[in-house]
Amino acid sequence: MSTRLKESQGPDFPNAGGRLGDAAPQFCLETVGLSHRYAEHGSGLTDVNLQVPEGCIYGFLGPNGAGKTTTLRLVLGLLRKQHGSVALFGKEFSKHRISCLANIGSLIESPSLYEHLTATENLRVMQKIHRVPAARIGEVLELIGLSDTRAKLVGQFSLGMKQRLSIGLALLHEPSLLILDEPTNGLDPSGIIEMRELLKKLNRENGVTILISSHLLSEIEKLASHVGIIHRGRLLFQGTLEQLREKRQDAGIVTLGTSDDLRTLQFLSGQVSGARIENGCITMPCLSNARLARINRQLVEQGIDVHKLVAVESDLETIFMNMVSN
Amino acid sequence: MLIGNYVRCFQSEWLKKKRSLGSWLIVVGALFTPTIIVVARMLHRGKLPALYAASDFWTSYWRSSWESMAIFFLPMAAILVTSLIVQIEYRNNAWKQVNTLPLSLTTIYFSKLAVVLVLMAEFFILFDVAVYVSAMVPATLLGNVSYPRAHLPPRDFVADAGRYWVASLPIVVAQYVLSLRFRSFLVPVGVGFMTWVAALAALSWKDGYILPYIYTMLAYLRDDPKTRITLPASQLNAWAIGYALCFTLAGYLLFVNKRQKG
């Protein structure tokens, strides 16, 4: 487990480090030491400890090929597990596969739809299995905005319509957990906004826990309450979006413009680590406002003019890039 | 509970075949030979009055209808229909959806197989009805041809259709297993065609009955004095059922132990 991950598992992750057998029910989904290796290219997952609290929207973030889909496939039993364990709703998945799946709706990668059938027929295929009343089909079509497609075959749908229908299939049986793998792929901006609003509404009004993967930080930032960042098969960060935002300040820099940069650097070397001259200015890690004011005062007292003092917070994009590039 | 799940899964699988190529092939395949027979008879209408007056009209008509069916169309239909039905999941990228449903893998495996077997039964029923209708068409349309005088033996027809269904089981199940195993449609169809050609070639070999794709041909040829394979019908059925059971078990083990499910 990475240092960052350990740091992040504060009060929001009370069961962190606990064994799976003792899984507290507040985690809708929990993986412990999940590792996987593909025989063909060797890469895969290493010791992924995912913890998705109940009722949250968990953004599972990572660049393409980071291991997001592999993790979700392992969670759903689509890949045979090699190491570690998966618990859903406090029950071990391998021992309670059917009861766990009965409470999950999923969309993994591209839509899985029968293109020679209509939207209603696709939903009817699932309705038989989930034993939900036939009236639910109309409700779902209404919810996803496809109630006027009638006899149109799914093969003639746009990608956005297919994606919405896939979400509809996942929602048909009103699951407690929705697992969506890059559901906004291929959607136009209005489609992305519609889907985001739909997911927020489901979470807010129906209390559905949502685990959504994406490679777009901006998308996750607008939707998720919790975030997990994965890169090269390792979970680099896990925590609330607030905890991730706090890192924004930690990862920020201060730029100083003075009348004598060399003397300033000499003065700072005894007080701040990581200060250096860059592009005619001095840059150093972000400090508290009080400490920054003190340094400014001391520099002036020593006869050094300070004509520029700028604190720049990193945006989440930079934090994310720093994480995956380190 | 288990049976309830199985029935619901079967109903769901049955819905998927709607408008599919596999379900159209069942209809076209079953009607093809009777249609050709009607056209041929209408073209050679001069011989029909004597033919329709014969006391063994139905027996000979039935046998001639089954000739191309048993040797060619039935194995082809079994190979293509089975592969096309399984291919619905691959073509629509839907295996991952199927495998995340709250169903046991056993239920999924056997309900899909049941759909293929019922479709094959539908093929035989349609064919039987079409054979009967095709025999009646010339008599209805042509003034000089009377309706057959011979008594229709429906029990023999149904029993024969049942025998052919049993004989087709090894082909259906082997194709099912291959289609589940390989994503590409060409693999099960290619292997199916090659095995069918091998079975055709083995008709002149006295031990040819050991080939699983040969039984529909033998079910037809068993009364032919020229055939070199002289196995009683009951033994042919036993071989066919034995192969079907072995393939079903092997396919089931491969299916549940698949490393990547969709």
Image (cartoon, rainbow, N blue to C red):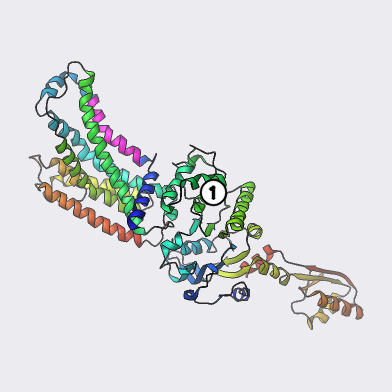
The picture places residue A265, in percent across and down from the top left corner, at 81, 78
Quarter occupied by the C terminus of chain A: bottom right
- Which residue sits furthest left? B225
Pointer 1 chain = A
- The vertical placement of A131 against B41, above or below, is below
Residue type, mark 1 in image: Gln
Residue B12 on the magenta segment: no
Which is nearer the eye, A1 or B62?
A: B62
Residue pointed to by mark 1: A163
> Residue B231 at x, y = what percent?
10, 48
Q: Judge by depth and name the residue closer to the eye, A208 or A42.
A: A208
Q: Residue furthest top?
A: B143
Residue at (61, 65) in percent of width and height: A227
Q: Which residues are magenta?
A: B22-38
- Does B145 sit left or right of B98 as displayed? left
- Classified by dominant secondary structure, the portion drawn in magenta counts as helix
